[in-house]
Amino acid sequence: MGYLDDEVKRLQSVIHSLENRVQALEGRQLGGPRKPTTEEIRMLLIGPPGAGKGTQAPKIKEKFSCCHLATGDMLRSQVAKKTPLGREAKKIMDQGGLVSDDIVIGMIREELDNNPECKGGFILDGFPRTVPQAEGLDSMLRERGQTLQHAVELQIDDGLLVSRITGRLVHPASGRSYHSKFSPPKKAMTDDITGEPLIQRSDDNAEALKKRLTTYHSQTAPVVRYYQKTGIWKAIDASQEPGTVWNSLLAIFDGDSAKARAAGGGLLGKLAARSSS
């Protein structure tokens, strides 16, 4: 059975390479870029602070070679670069106001248009937080000829979250997170990759966290219902080990590939269609 399994994997790899070649040639023949493939990902990661978004998003990014758009980081980046949207956002924030949905969606659109990493798709983290934001995001994507594929909610008990977050350590520059008990860095208070110091956020204490969770649940419930109605919402038990959570995500992505193959979207489907015509 080992030989057969290896041969099947080899053939799948060959077919995948041929599919990419066919798609590239089709795009060239039409005089434009190729259409997005099933390897492109367009998804939201929904979950309270400490649910594991910062652990899973880099893995998804690596698998699909896509961009990870955490709205807080994106906002700070645009302000630092002094882009037109960044200057507008800074002016509002300096006056103590909240940045409008239109500005945030405009920043997302700008990233999708100009960030090379976004050619492989995107993971949105921290947005949308309200139904009007979700509707605005859908409208912007429709203008680009795109739709969301997944809204994945990482679900976890509040009590477990409190124990997770009160020991959380963060590398400010990258957003990498550790835990003093569950996932400690190799060297105390030091990022494994850069050797730079880690910090504990001032709002990562039990009392502040409970208030944040109350706000999160009241905001998120309507957004979850919105995506449940569209049929793209999926839930994962985030109290499990990170590797188990990752396997659950892979099962969701593999389901997409299976649907595409069943629809005859792959090379074998095209060959079968031609031979029967």
Image (cartoon, grey):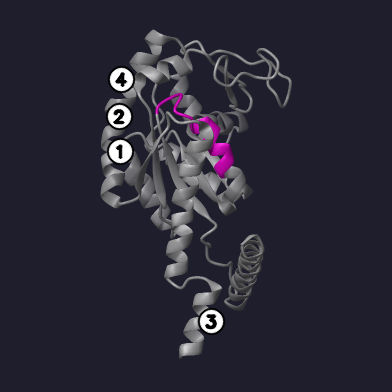
Residue, disc 1: 223
Residue 11 x %, y %: 64, 69
Residue, disc 4: 214
Main secondary structure of the magenta stretch: helix
**Residue at disc 4, secondary structure:** helix
**Residue at disc 1, secondary structure:** helix
The answer to whether residue 74 is visible is: no
Q: Nearer the viewer, mark 2 or mark 3?
A: 3
* Local crowd size for mark 4, using a 10 Å CA cut-off: few (<14), some (14–19), many (≥20): few
Which of the 4 quarters of the picture holds residue 189?
top right
Task: Give the alpha-carbon distance from disc 2 to disc 3, as whole Å.
Answer: 48 Å
Above or below residue 86? Residue 12 is below
* Local crowd size for mark 3, using a 10 Å CA cut-off: few (<14), some (14–19), many (≥20): few
Q: Name the kind of residue labelled 3 in the image.
A: Leu
Q: Name the kind of residue labelled 1 in the image.
A: Val
Above or below residue 206? Residue 7 is below
The answer to whether residue 60 is visible is: yes
Task: Give the alpha-carbon distance from disc 1 to disc 4, as whole Å.
Answer: 15 Å
Residue, disc 3: 271
The quarter of the rendered structure image containing the N terminus is: bottom right
Q: Name the kind of residue labelled 4 in the image.
A: Thr
